[in-house]
Amino acid sequence: VPVHCTINNVIFIDKDDEGLRKDLVLFSEEFTATADNSAFAPTDADLFSCVGVISVDVFYNFGSNQIGQSTTPLSLVAPHGRLWCQIQTQGADNIAAGSEPIVLITVE
């Protein structure tokens, strides 16, 4: 990503039709990964490289799947031209095999 950039649009493709709010926690450095099926718990040190959080809480239901979208702009600095992201679900996901979500981010 550009060192100085703005995220203008996030699309969350929810192939499993869950429709649960997602918080995309963005970091400018690699962070300590959360163990599979565990609650997101960044370390205090990791929080220093957090450059923002984008919530996807508007979903459009199409019967057997959904699309979530956030158009709230987030301006940030990514000193190394890279971003890392942890997605936190506000609720209990139960994603079926083959229905893993896809996240699309527009960066300017």
Image (spheres, rainbow, N blue to C red):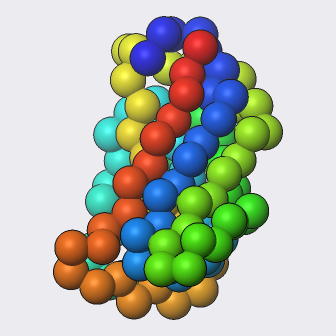
Q: Nearer the viewer, residue 98 or 22?
A: 98
Instruction: Please state, as top left, top right, bottom left or bottom right, where the C terminus lies in the image.
Output: top right
Q: x and y percent of residue 66 in the render?
A: 56, 68
Q: Is residue 74 visible?
A: yes
| Residue at the (41%, 78%) spot, across then down | 16
Q: Residue at x 52, y 42 (%)?
A: 26
Left or right of 57 in this view: 35: left
Most extreme residue toward the front, as rendered? Answer: 63
Name of the residue lying farthest toward the right: 72
Q: Which is more toward the observer, 38 or 59?
A: 59
Residue 21's x, y, as percent?
65, 71
Task: Please determine whether, in this image, residue 9 is positioned above or below residue 32.
Answer: above
Q: Residue at left 78%, top 39%? A: 72
Q: Quadrant of the N terminus?
A: top left
Residue 27 vs 11, above or below: the answer is: above
- Image location (x, y in percent) of residue 36: 26, 77
**Which residue does the image show at 38% across and 15% down from the upper left?**
80
Number of numbered discs visible in the structure rendering:
0
58 w.r.t. 108: above or below = below
- Quarter of the figure with residue 68: bottom right
Judge whether residue 48 can be spotted in this image. Answer: no
